[in-house]
Amino acid sequence: MPSGDSSTPRPGAVIAFLYDLRVGGAETSLLAELREVRALGLDVSVAYIGTDETLRPRFERAGIPVHSVRGSSGLSTLRNLVGFLREHRPALVHTSLFWPDVVVRPVARLLGIPVLTSLTNEYYGPEHRENSKYGSLGVLAAHLADVVSSRFATRFHAISHRVAEVMGRRLLVPPQRITVIHRGRDLSHLGRRSPERRAATRASLGLGEETVFLCVGRQDHQKSHDTAVRAFAGLDDPDAVLLLAGRPGNNTAAIDTAIADAPHSSRIVLLGERSDVADLLCAADYYVMPSRWEGLSGALIEAMALEIPLLVSDLAVFQEVTDTKAWFFTPGDIDACRGVLARALGEPYPADFIASSRIRAEETFEIGAVAAQMRDLYLAMMGARGETK
């Protein structure tokens, strides 16, 4: 890899750094945004330092160059990173998630490259410290490293006002250095809800006219699907079904135990990781999101766009995303969650909530508008136009 530093920054050249290309909320959202930003005329590419390349073909099909800078050791990866940035000399580096933030930010700034960092979740809080596999001291160490490394960021982008408030406070970043741009979804790609789509997806799942509750997301403690399982298990309705779609995670054992304890476990179905989440949302009667904390949630935006009733935990970010047009319950509270599920079985969900959710998805979270905001932020940081509001 060339190590020369004589090339000049290319107009519009942005390199976004991820840890790897796994199927996750931050990764898939970045893919959608960069695809649209590229269509708006900016030169964008992606680099990563991990080993998972699942999304690489999707980035490449979108015309986004992909680069691995991983070496055989931590030191060789660092050398590769320095050489890569010297060779490509982007006008801007965009980092997301812990390792790119902590490792790439300082290197890029020491090479004179401005850095935008995305704040994508609520990290380092009590729930995180109490339930991390690294223990509370590990979370504290990560928090300290993030605070120190964040001094190298030129500017921050937060995916919600709640994340901007919480992470700005935890990283000691003043509000004026954070720009809030929500994550977006391609609503045209999602399609629309219809009786035909509902029936076809239900038939493929072996379902008829049961009342279907759906949870979507990886099986992590943060998502709290075990709460939904235990709440559902206490319902006395033989015609209700709970579907859980998402890859295994650090809460899989708790979910499996909750299902085993359920008196009607056959009515709780693990679907695994799915590529047809939009179809599943169309097949479901209610979308259940019992998260203990969140940054925003792309699946919630998709549920809003597909006009499904929302039964969600009472988090500030969910209040923000839904504009309070949902039925809420206390996070992690099995009885409260069960109460909302029971309410759904016995009381009509407000039609105006559904209509408002679709309108909000179109006006606030449509990918084209979100990408235009990201492009303007990139250009502002590269000095191509005035400060983005």
Image (cartoon, grey):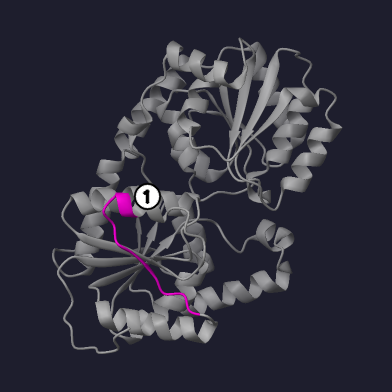
Regarding mark 1 in the picture, which secondary structure is present there?
helix
Relative height, residue 156 to residue 279 (above, below): below
| Residue situated in front as seen by the camera: 254 or 109 | 254
Find the magenta span and give its range: 60-71
- In which image quadrant can residue 84 be found? bottom left
| Residue situated in front as seen by the camera: 200 or 174 | 200
Image quarter (top left, top right, bottom left or bottom right) of the C terminus: bottom left
Rendered location of residue 48, percent (x, y)? 43, 67
Q: What residue type is labelled 1?
A: Arg
Q: Which residue position holds label 1?
A: 58
Q: Does the magenta stretch include residue 213?
A: no
Rendered location of residue 241, percent (x, y)? 68, 21
- In which image quadrant can residue 257 be found? top right
Image side of residue 209 versus residue 226, left or right: left
Q: Is residue 62 magenta?
A: yes
Relative height, residue 117 to residue 206 (above, below): below
How many numbered circles are shown?
1
Which residue is depicted at the point 51% across and 56% down? 121
Image side of residue 233 versus residue 381, left or right: right
| Residue situated in front as seen by the camera: 91 or 23 | 23
Which residue is depicted at the point 25% across and 60% down? 377
Neighbours of disc 1 within 10 Å: few (<14), some (14-19), many (20+): some
Q: Can residue 313 be seen in this view?
A: yes
Which residue is depicted at the point 56% across and 20% down? 204
- In which image quadrant can residue 15 be found? bottom left
Relative height, residue 207 to residue 45 (above, below): above
